[in-house]
Amino acid sequence: MTELSPARRTRPYVIAWVCSLLFYFLEYAVRSGPAVMLPELGQVFGVGTAGVGAILGTYYYTYSVAGLVAGVVLDRTGAKYALPAGIALVALGCALFAVPGAVAGTSGRLLQGAGSAFAFTGSVYLASRGFQARSLATAIGATQCLGMLGGALGQSLAGPLVHQGFDVRFYWLLMGLANLATGVALYFITPDDTSEQAQKPAARAGLLAPYKIVFRNPQSYLCGLVAGLLFAPTTIFAMNWGVAALQQDKQLSYAAAAWACSMVPLGWVVGCPLLGWLADRLGRRKPALLLGAVGMGLVGLQQLYLPALLPLYLSLLLFGVASGAAMIPYSIIKEANPDEVKGSATGAMNFLTFGVSALLGPLFARFYGQSLGHAPDPAAHFQAGGLFWVACTSVAILTSLLLRETGAAAKQQQVAGRAQVA
């Protein structure tokens, strides 16, 4: 029997990866969409704006924990069954948003978070099987690009649609059906490598064996902390509090606030693949990571202290471009751990990253959200909230200095150095 060429062996995974991008696109629309329909969801759930915010925040609890489950399932069974199962959970969670009552809303959001954990982890798993190492950071950046495009459209299109009278319950039923259709397509497209995965040493060693490898590596924790601190300004502020903050503290109209906040995920559409490409081009991860993180801090400070220098929407767009650097630690953690735990490394990364979000979310809500709309000086209130995220970015920059370089150029240099010693 003729052995398949590497290109023909990997092509089915590339095709499945392309299809998984649609799931990630929809998942981000599900994640960000509620921020622009808080009053409408409040009517469905029978709670106030603060109650809706509490319901939406539960997403990150199940997302972070389910990331661990998604990683080990992918390492043991592959993506053919894991990804459609995750999509089914998201679809059910969307459907529950059409059911009146806070219990249905909370249950739906928990299911959305649990199922969404399979989106990025599964896409990265397929990318790692379909692309060579020198292109992996670019592929991961493209993956996040499509996700953030979903986040941008989830706000800029869904908000005006719902505010013009479109039934919010019907909107969430349509989102559920779109996810379900994507899951069916992925089931038939994705290669079945269950038996191959089961033969790998990490799978035979036991259910938790991959995570023992990942969590014994100090670099894994550093990657999670850096990514979590860089993710938080977009996942917590821009996608949850941003519209309300700009309305209350900056006195913008709803349409202007929603448009401005949608610029952050739109910036990711450019920044994720651009910084991923730069990391691959340089053969080094840390310079691209530091470039983006420093850019986030500078743009944040500009908007807080020199707001007239650039329009708000442009500042937020540039902030989104720079924050694409948050994806680079996902490449680092995969390269800092053995190949047989690729899925678990991504699952652990999601757990650590969004564990940081789960901790920072309530802290920011207590520090900033409780006084939103009641602050005696709205401008100072907005500045204090902005400095919270600038501080997070600064800690991420300092932590990234402790990361070990894992890029191809650094590895070649290490090999050359060992050869000279020998």
Image: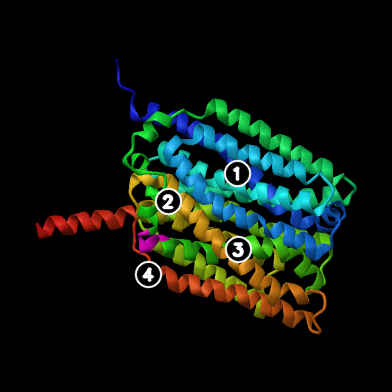
Quadrant housing residue 56: bottom right
List the residue tagged with mark 4: 402
- In the image, what residue type sits under mark 4? Leu
Indicate whether 401 appears above or below 156: below
Indicate whether 222 appears above or below 81: below
The magenta segment is 216-220
The residue that appears at 66% across and 69% down in the rendered structure is 362
Front tag of 3 and 4: 3
Q: Please indicate whether residue 205 sits to the left or right of residue 117 in the image.
A: left
SS label for mark 1:
helix
User: What is the CA distance from the residue labelled 1 to the residue labelled 3?
Assistant: 20 Å
- In the image, what residue type sits under mark 3? Ala
First along the sequence among labels 1 and 2: 1
The residue that appears at 73% across and 62% down in the rendered structure is 54
Badge 4 crowding class, 10 Å Cα cut-off, few under 14, some 14 to 19, many 20 or more, is: few
| In-front residue for pair 305/20 | 20
